Image (spheres, helix red, strand yellow):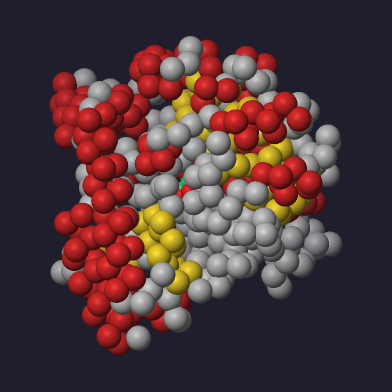
Amino acid sequence: MRGSTEPGNGSRSMNIAGADSHRGEAHPEPARWLDNLAPYDPVSSLDKIWAKPQQIPFKLDWNESTIPPAPGVYRAIVNFLSHSNHLNWYPELGSHSLCHALSNYVDLPEENILVTNGSDDALELVCKTYLEPGNRVVVPMPTYTHFLVYVEARGAQVVPFYSSDLFDSAVDELRQVLTQDTKLVYLVNPNNPTGVTYSAGEVAGLLESFPNTLFLVDEAYFEFHGETVMGLVGRYENLVVTRTFSKCFGIAGLRMGYLCTGPSVMRQLKKLFNPKSVNRLGQIAAMACLEDLDYYRAFVREVTQAKELFRSEMAKRGLNVIITPANFVNMKVPDPPRFCRLLEEEGVYVRDRSSLPRMESYVRVSIPSVSQMHEVIRRIDRALARL
Ligand SMILES: Cc1ncc(COP(=O)(O)O)c(C=O)c1O
């Protein structure tokens, strides 16, 4: 069921030989529902990149930004480290200053915002708070697979939903698998990896039809898409929206994310929330990101242009690229694993998605700036010549 997780990814899968087959020997027992889970085994292109320091890499496998964060981010961090080096103190509890800045950005009161250690932390917090063994969690597939770990960690059951058209949200078909006792629905908007989107109207319809179900809408790629369901927060008590600073804002290494929700869900989430889980440098960097939105708007324009450039250039080479509203596209290639290997030799790291059901011929490519894209295309040509 689970392929690999996003950052980290790798070879973790359910029911593999060797997963906790030694029950019965004398040792502390983990939760029973972890029996079928194999240890998380992350695979990172970073090791390969660091092994070739002489080559300029294009890391296009995890949908990170390909440019540095806004200059103010460095200034703010350097300023903190040189003038008030208080790394020995805990971070600002609850990230109140950042909540204040985010309140403007998301157009919601501060009480509706919780800053987390990456949006993964927000996803996990929701699962920890709301799921227990036996619960059903409906997930349109393929999806951001790391989320499935958090569901399984609670002993809950992932109910995968495949629409008849992989690249269409098919909300009417999704409704057919939802019941009044579906505990949670995870909608990635736009979806990773397919790029499928859900309009605010569609999500509002679902929220109304299934008031006992919590809808977790993951807007990790909001800045590229520009459309949001954030306006529904507070109007519906069964909605949580998560976002991240890891993608457009370019500070994945500092692990900053947040969630927005109404008062009753927030009250529950705060029971398990750790107010010191967000690091101080991340708090400072995220504030500085929000102070230079023009820098990021310019990057989004670049990515939009580069997506079109990539599609038209690959079409000339007979390769079909499916554009998404996020900062990645899916490309059909003849032999994905070999294509990725050849591309790695050129210093371009894309994501082989061909092991996911119904993504058999696809690789996912994160989109860089236009000038970076020209160089990526040159390297792709060299790889294609050897395919
Ligand atoms: C849909 C989606 N959600 C969440 C994440 C993780 O984001 P973060 O770095 O904020 O934990 C990713 C990362 O790839 C993602 O694709």
Residue at x 64% of width, y 28% of height: 204
Asked whether 140 or 342 is in front, the reply is 140
Q: Nearer the viewer, residue 41 or 366?
A: 366
Query: x and y percent of residue 160 in the render?
Result: 71, 54
Q: Is residue 42 above or below residue 342?
A: above
Q: Is residue 50 visible?
A: no
Is 104 left or right of 162, judged from the image as shown?
left
The residue under the point 51% across, 60% down is 9
Residue 243 in the image: state x and y as whole percent.
47, 34
| Left or right: 193 as drawn, with respect to 57 | right
- Residue 72 shown left or right of residue 189 in the figure: left
Q: Residue furthest bottom?
A: 386
Image quarter (top left, top right, bottom left or bottom right) of the N terminus: bottom right
Q: Toward which corner of the image does residue 283 lie, by quadrant?
A: top left
362 to the left or right of 17: left
Q: How many marks?
A: 0
Residue 387 horizontal/vertical position (percent): 35, 86
Residue at 75% in and 43% down: 175
Which quarter of the figure has residue 224?
A: top left
Q: Is residue 53 above or below residue 195?
A: below
Instruction: Looking at the picture, tell me which residue is in the foreground, 152 or 180.
Output: 180
The spot of residue 249 in percent (x, y) is 32, 38
Image position of 152 with respect to 210: above or below: below
Q: Does residue 64 appear in this view?
A: yes
Residue drawn at x 23%, y 60% as measured from the top left = 373
Residue sitting nearer the eye, 62 or 39:
62
